[in-house]
C-alpha cells in the first residue's frame, strides 16, 4: 500500500520536473498542433458524422436502457421475494439446504 503511494509521488514529481523543463513554449506548440488538427475540415466532417449518428441512435438507446432497467427491477423484486420464502421455510423448521437437496435429487 505504502509502496504504491511512493511510486505515485515519484511519478508526479518526475512529470512536474519534465513539464517545467519543457516550459510554456512547448505547451503552446502542442496547443497549436491540437488546434490545427481539430479545425481540419476532414476532422470536422467526421465530427459531424458522429453527431448525426448519435442523434439517430439516441431514441434506440433510450428504449434499450428503459427495457433493461425494467428487466433488472423485475428480477430484483422477484429475487427478494425468493429470499423471504427461504426465511419463512427456515422459520417453519425446514432448512433451505434441506429444501435445495430434495429438489436437486428430484431433478435426477
Image (tube, rainbow, N blue to C red):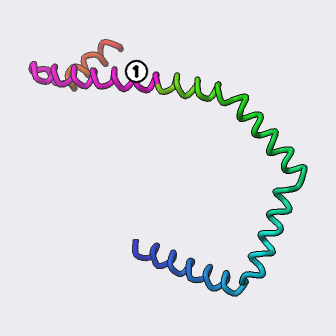
Q: Quadrant of the N terminus?
A: bottom left
Residue at image point 85% right, 56% down: 39
* Residue drawn at 36 percent across, 26 percent down: 76
Q: Quadrant of residue 2?
A: bottom left
Q: Give SS at disc 1.
A: helix
Tell which residue pokes out farthest to the top in this image.
106
Rendering coords of residue 101 (x, y %): 25, 21
User: At x 80% / y 64%, what residue is drawn?
Assistant: 34
Q: Is residue 52 above or below residue 67?
A: below
In what quadrant of the picture does the C terminus appear?
A: top left
Q: Residue 107, located in which quarter of the rendered image? A: top left
Residue 47 sits in quarter: top right
- Residue beneath label 1, please? 74
Report the magenta residues as a range: 70-95
Q: Residues within 10 Å of mark 1 (few under 14, many from 20)?
A: few
Q: Is 94 a magenta residue?
A: yes
Q: Residue at x 26, y 22 (%)?
A: 100
Q: Position of residue 63 (x, y in %)?
A: 58, 23
Residue 17 sits inside the magenta stretch: no
Left or right: residue 5 compared with residue 102: right
**Vertical position of residue 52 compared to residue 107: above or below:** below
Number of numbered tags placed on the structure image: 1
Q: Is residue 59 left or right of residue 93?
A: right
Amino acid at each position: 500500500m505504502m509502496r504504491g503511494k511512493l511510486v505515485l509521488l515519484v511519478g508526479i514529481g518526475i512529470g512536474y520536473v519534465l513539464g517545467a523543463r519543457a516550459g510554456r513554449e512547448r505547451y503552446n506548440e502542442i496547443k497549436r498542433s491540437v488546434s490545427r488538427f481539430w479545425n481540419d475540415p476532414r476532422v470536422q466532417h467526421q465530427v459531424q458524422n458522429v453527431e448525426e449518428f448519435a442523434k439517430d441512435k439516441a431514441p434506440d438507446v433510450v428504449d434499450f436502457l428503459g427495457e433493461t432497467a425494467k428487466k433488472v427491477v423485475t428480477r430484483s423484486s422477484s429475487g427478494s421475494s425468493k429470499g423471504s420464502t427461504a426465511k419463512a421455510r427456515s422459520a417453519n423448521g425446514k432448512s433451505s439446504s434441506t429444501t435445495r437437496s430434495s429438489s436437486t435429487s428430484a431433478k435426477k
